[in-house]
Image (tube, rainbow, N blue to C red):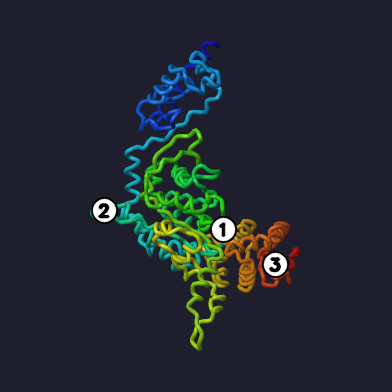
Amino acid sequence: MSNLDDYNNDKNIDSHNTTDHKDHEEYEEVCYLCRRPESKVGKMIHIPNQISICSDCMQKTFDTINKGDNPYMQMMGITPNMMNLSNLQSDIPKAQKLKKSKPEENEEAKEAFDRKKIPAPHLIKASLDDFIIGQEHAKKVISVAVYNHYKRIGTTMDSEIEIEKSNMLMIGPTGSGKTYLVKTLAKLLNVPLAITDATSLTEAGYIGDDVESVISKLLQAAGNDVKKAERGIVFIDEIDKIAKKRNTNSRDVSGESVQQGLLKLLEGSDVEVPVGATSKNAMVPLTTVNTQNILFICGGAFPDLEKTIKARLSKQSSIGFKADLKDKYDDDQNILQKVNLDDLREYGMIPEFLGRLPIMYTLEGLTKDMLVQVLKEPKNAILKQYQKLLALDEVDLQFELEALEAIAEKAIEKKTGARALRAILEDLMLDIMYEIPKDENIGRVVITRDYIEGKGVPLIEMRGTGNHKILAVNN
């Protein structure tokens, strides 16, 4: 029995050594004290409990211990003789490693963005048309900007001609498809995408995320592959929430200060970011990411911006038969399309920030006809999802056109754009999804306008007979 135990122990040791060898080939060690990787500080010094320390930190530690006059050590009553690593092992966190950058992986990353493999703008827009209804101008602008951006970083440019980044500012009412447009674009191009909320960003030193956390999320989306992250897309949503605060006597740590901090990221610089965390104070490795080839897309609804635009346009009104009336733009649903840089500066965005977002475009507010199209035409339309769910029960779900129009009218009343469609359908379909599985003879369900308006019930057709049945639902 003892021979068998010895054999198993030897086998476990060999397996452990093999795993450590593979990890050493794929990952590089990180200094426990300064969190710098092996590629920057050189060979590590290993101490018990799988701790790696670079030679610089080890030398500083020895100098501090040998000196013996450290005020903090004296204050705590610690002497050099009391410094014993075995006493600290219980509080040591798990060792962390940073993935090495392999030359062949870098070549594959470069090849993935070969100029010949980049889809042309009309192909990008055609792919977006399958998922997004309307917004023709926005889809055209973002297709050209993304095509030029990846063409810029996928080819070797002449040193005398340097093409600048094409960062974008997207303005549109809530529920118009800003976030969904960027998500679909990143999925089509197969590039890392980080979506962050500007409301969580604050000036360095205050509670909240630093601006570098934006790059940390992109690095995490790229699987901690720096080269892959440096060709990704960052979408900063709710960008209007970092506008300068007015009439405040306190420090604006989440407004203008955040805009100032984002300037270096938008323009392109080397940023030292933590791996796997949003704070540099965490015990995590640090790595350097260059933002020169990262495409930044900022989006926001900019509530009450319409008032600023109307005030500017109303200044042109005068007295006379051909003069413009002050209430001319009150019923304009697409007033945001008349925005300019002066309006954004008045709103609270600083000129330096706007200057680093050279491409600015707006999304249209969704009309009744557009909402009907959103319900039924995209590849993953909401109606198709419900039809698929009932098809699994061998039931055919249909919506009358008038019923779709009634749903769109309800969505417009909620003033939350396309987001209202899902909430309305969830409420309408609850009883249907509950009652249908009770009867296996039901073959078809037709949703009518009367049911949407609460004046009737869905039309139920029994399987194989063509007879109708009244479904008892609580609408």
464 on left or right of 208? right
Disc 3 target residue: 460
* Left or right: residue 210 compared with residue 407: left
Earlier-in-chain disc, 2 versus 3: 2
Q: Nearer the viewer, residue 253 or 213?
A: 253
Q: Amino acid at mark 3?
A: Ile
Q: Dot 1: what SS? A: loop
Kindly identify which residue carries mark 2: 157
Residue at screen point 51% across, 76% down = 314
Q: CA distance from mark 2 to mark 3?
A: 65 Å
Amino acid type of the residue that numbered disc 2 sits on in the rendered structure: Met
Q: Position of residue 295 (x, y in %)?
A: 40, 53
Q: CA distance from mark 1 to mark 3?
A: 61 Å
Q: Are marks 1 and 3 in contact (CB under 8 Å)?
A: no
Residue 213 tag number: none
Q: Is residue 246 left or right of residue 216?
A: right
Instruction: Pinpoint residue 463: horizontal percent, then vertical percent.
Output: 67, 64
Q: Which amino acid type is shown beneath numbered disc 1?
A: Asn
Question: Can I make out residue 7 in this image?
Answer: no
- Quadrant containing the N terminus is top right
How far apart in space, not on screen, are marks 1 and 2 (Cα)? Answer: 48 Å
Rendered residue at 49%/84% (across/down)? 323
Crowd band around label 3 with a 10 angstrom C-alpha radius: few (<14), some (14–19), many (20+): many
Task: From the image, tell me which residue sits under label 1.
Answer: 247
Given residues 439 and 386, the one toward you in this image is 386
